[in-house]
Amino acid sequence: MAHMWILLCFLTGTSYAAEVCFDELGCFADLPPWGGTPQRPAAVLPWRPEEIGTRFLLFTPMNRYYQEIDTDQSVAISNYSGKRKTRFIIPGYLKNGDEDWPQEMCKVMLKWQNVNCIAVEWKKGVAAPYAQAANNARVVAARVASMITFLMVRTAQTADKFHIIGHSIGAHAAGDVGSRIAGLARITGLDPIEPYFQDTDASVSLDTSDAAFVDVIHTDALPFNSKLGLGMTQSVGHIDFYPNGGELMPGCSANKGKPTDLDAFWEGTKKFDACNHVQAYKYYSESMIKSQGFLGFPCSDKDSFAAGKCFPCADNTCPLMGYNSDRFPMTDGISKTKYFLNTGSSTPFGRYSYKVMVTLEGPSWSNLGVMHVALAGAADSTQEHKLHVGAITPGKTYEKMIDAEVDVGEVTEVKFRWNNHIINILKPKYGASKVELQRGKDKKIFFFCGTERVVENGIQSVLPCQA
């Protein structure tokens, strides 16, 4: 059991500053920047390591179930190998029924990578009043740093073989680890939490000094005090992604409640839907399997992106959000640009972006109606996507951005359909005389030519134009 010392220092007639020390983990004070600041008003000391209950659950290609390890001989009898890279996953907010997602992420990771994956568990320490949990994370960070130091000494690994993935408070704990161990290869922040961390000193929150590469995914980035967004609004990484604008995720509802209820939300005594906050680690998990579905477009803001002003990708300017974001060539060290993309509302979340322009042909008069298109290729076919609702006028070109739910590969066919559910004795026929399709990831343009018109709800197959 770790020994603890508490030091009380007289500051004013009624207030004290305290410090608590735990053997090899060091000392933790409640002085600024850790407490008593506008960003962190409550001065709170972390719990003892035994109360926090940090555990290290190791997954490797050699074991399907985890092996619990610590800074002792348990590593020697485990399947840990210094020849493999090592990834730690530090959770933060606990969504009821989903507490073990780091273990599931490790299992997914090992299907694609030959690594040591360590799920960090601290369920006791995080299930506390919010300010307490935020400070308990400091001890978790010290425990992870101690574990990394132990592994480096035992296996001769170097710091650049370690990658830490942290969600919510865990993202800032990951940053704390990086401030304790120089030269970490990478830290991934999954919706780093805002309260007690935004606009704080760099030593408190995740920032670019914590690892050689810091990538961040923002999914709940509305301001906490006014909109109850749990995630940080500010960019804190070498590269920051804002899927769906970073504020409200498809399939999730807007956060409801009062900022004063944060403790109750955190401890689970008052209902709070953390859907937006937890989507970050769901996107990251899927990115390990289908990385191309998470292409980030550089853009000044979410409204410009939604308006299609940042489409398509210029050469080598679009990184992949998630697992493969470290493959993006950083020319200036830290990207000053935000990256935006759209996702689906449920798995699979990844999307593949196109701009489609359809020139309509048909009778000489206009009709009210709805037009749909679907894309097909050698690999797959998409669902129908609504192209236009309203007056459909022959000779006019209709344009729409489409986020396809599957990767069709090279597009070989566009399927066109129209309807208006109005009985028309003339039985008009419409068709796409020309389709121009631009792919978002590489600006490639495909041309398709239509040779027929179809009745309502008929499917027109529009094939590549013949030279």
Image (spheres, rainbow, N blue to C red):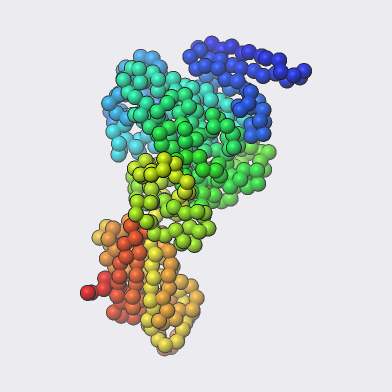
The tally of labels here is: 0
Q: Is residue 226 left or right of residue 312?
A: right
Q: Residue at x 47, y 24 (%)?
A: 180
- Above or below residue 19? Residue 382 is below
Corner quadrant of residue 160: top left
The structure residue drawn at horizontal position 55% and vertical position 30%, both measured from the top left corner, is 204
Residue sitting farthest toward the left: 467
From this viewpoint, is residue 234 visible? yes
Looking at this view, is 327 or 128 the one in front?
Answer: 327
Specify the farthest residue to the front: 332
The image shows residue 392, relative to residue 182, as above or below, that is below
In percent of width and height, residue 65 lies at 35, 29
**Rendered location of residue 273, percent (x, y):** 57, 44
How far across and down, in percent of the image, does residue 404 sit?
38, 59
Pick out the residue farthest to the right: 13
Residue at the spot 39% in from the left edge and 54% down from the top edge = 351
Residue plotted at (59% across, 37% down): 199
Quarter occupied by residue 229: top right
Work out whether residue 250 can be spotted.
Answer: no
Q: Nearer the viewer, residue 99 or 288?
A: 288
Tell me the quarter of the picture where residue 39 sits: top right
Quarter of the image for the C terminus: give it: bottom left
Identify whether 301 is placed above or below 419: above
Q: Is residue 332 above or below residue 358?
A: above
Q: Position of residue 67 (x, y in %)?
A: 36, 24
Tell which of 401 and 427 is nearer to you: 401
Q: In screen coordinates, is 179 left or right of 467?
A: right
Is residue 302 shown left or right of residue 409? right
